[in-house]
């Protein structure tokens, strides 16, 4: 597939570094993912993922949650921005805000998230630290559809990695991130080509 055929419109929401965003951009550029990133939105103005998008001439917007009185108003502004780009899929890539029901219902079965744990184990933040502290022998990555329960929507794919004896947050984290970056563009490709959909 050629990059010019990349037409399945997505919007990516980030809060930080954007390594998953970068992986998606790379796969699109290489012609392996038939998506088009219409925009990258961040709730954090300092998110370095924004620079990655700008370098690739992808429109960016910052909608700071702190500028709004409550989550509802923040999400209203977020939806207004997203809807300008008419995405068929909303990709959460390190987006560190919990999304409310109204937002989720606005994009039914069209929001996905990547989470660094074997869900339903270790939802929320700091899963690596928790896995190591608990002495788990395996860890992994989950990609799932987003519902109004945190990190609990229908699973699309889950891959395990062993936790090694000397693993630290850095070494285990690096392996988890590598896995995320391989899997997430693949899942977007599956969704874009109709190979998966959310049945729930
Ligand atoms: C990833 O580990 C992802 O699983 C989690 O947040 C992190 C984002 O990393 N939801 P990046 O911003 O894509 O580098």
Image (tube, grey):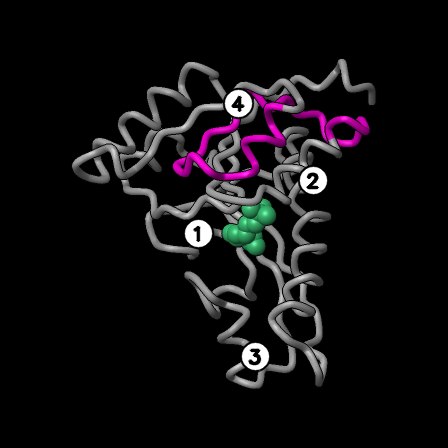
Where residue 76 sits in the image (x, y, percent)?
Answer: 27, 27
Query: In this rendering, would 117 be left or right of 193?
Result: left
Packing grade of label 3 (10 A; few <14, some 14-19, many >=20) is some
Sequence order check: which comes first, mark 2 or mark 1?
A: 2
User: In which quadrant of the rendered view does residue 189 lie?
Assistant: top right
- Looking at the rendered structure, the secondary structure element under dot 4 is strand
Where residue 55 sits in the image (x, y, percent)?
Answer: 65, 24
Sequence order check: which comes first, mark 3 or mark 1?
A: 3
Q: Relative to 158, is 4 above or below? A: above
Which residue range is magenta in the image? 28-54
Residue under label 3:
132
CA gap, disc 2 to disc 4?
Answer: 15 Å
Residue 96: within the magenta?
no
Q: Relative to 74, is 120 above or below? A: below
Residue under label 4:
39
CA gap, disc 2 to disc 1?
Answer: 23 Å
Residue at 60% x, 23% y: name it: 54
Q: Is residue 30 among the parts visible in the rendering?
A: yes
Where residue 112 sits in the image (x, y, percent)?
Answer: 51, 42
Query: In this rendering, would 134 be left or right of 7?
Result: left
* Residue mark closest to the camera, 3 vs 1: 3
Residue under label 1:
153
Packing grade of label 2 (10 A; few <14, some 14-19, many >=20) is some
* Residue mark closest to the camera, 4 vs 1: 4
- State whether label 2 is within 8 Å of ligand 1: yes
CA gap, disc 4 to disc 3?
Answer: 36 Å
Sequence order check: which comes first, mark 2 or mark 3?
A: 2
Residue under label 2:
23
């Amino acid at each position: 597939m050629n990059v010019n055929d990349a037409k399945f419109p997505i919007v990516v929401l980030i809060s930080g570094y954007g390594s998953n965003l970068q992986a998606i951009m790379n796969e699109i550029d290489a012609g392996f993912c038939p998506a088009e990133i219409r925009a990258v939105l961040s709730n954090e103005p300092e998110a370095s993922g924004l620079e990655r998008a700008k370098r690739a001439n992808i429109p960016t917007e910052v909608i700071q949650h702190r500028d709004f009185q409550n989550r509802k108003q923040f999400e209203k502004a977020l939806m207004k921005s997203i809807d300008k780009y008419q995405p068929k899929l909303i990709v959460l890539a390190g987006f560190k805000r919990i999304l409310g029901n109204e937002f989720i219902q606005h994009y039914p079965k069209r929001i996905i998230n990547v989470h660094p744990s074997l869900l339903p184990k270790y939802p929320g933040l700091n899963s690596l630290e928790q896995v190591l502290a608990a002495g788990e022998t395996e860890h992994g990555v989950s990609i799932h559809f987003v519902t109004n329960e945190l990190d609990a929507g229908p699973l699309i794919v889950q891959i395990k990695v062993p936790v090694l004896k000397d693993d630290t947050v850095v070494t285990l984290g690096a392996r988890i991130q590598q896995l995320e970056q391989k899997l997430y563009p693949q899942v977007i490709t599956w969704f874009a080509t109709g190979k998966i959909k959310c049945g729930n």
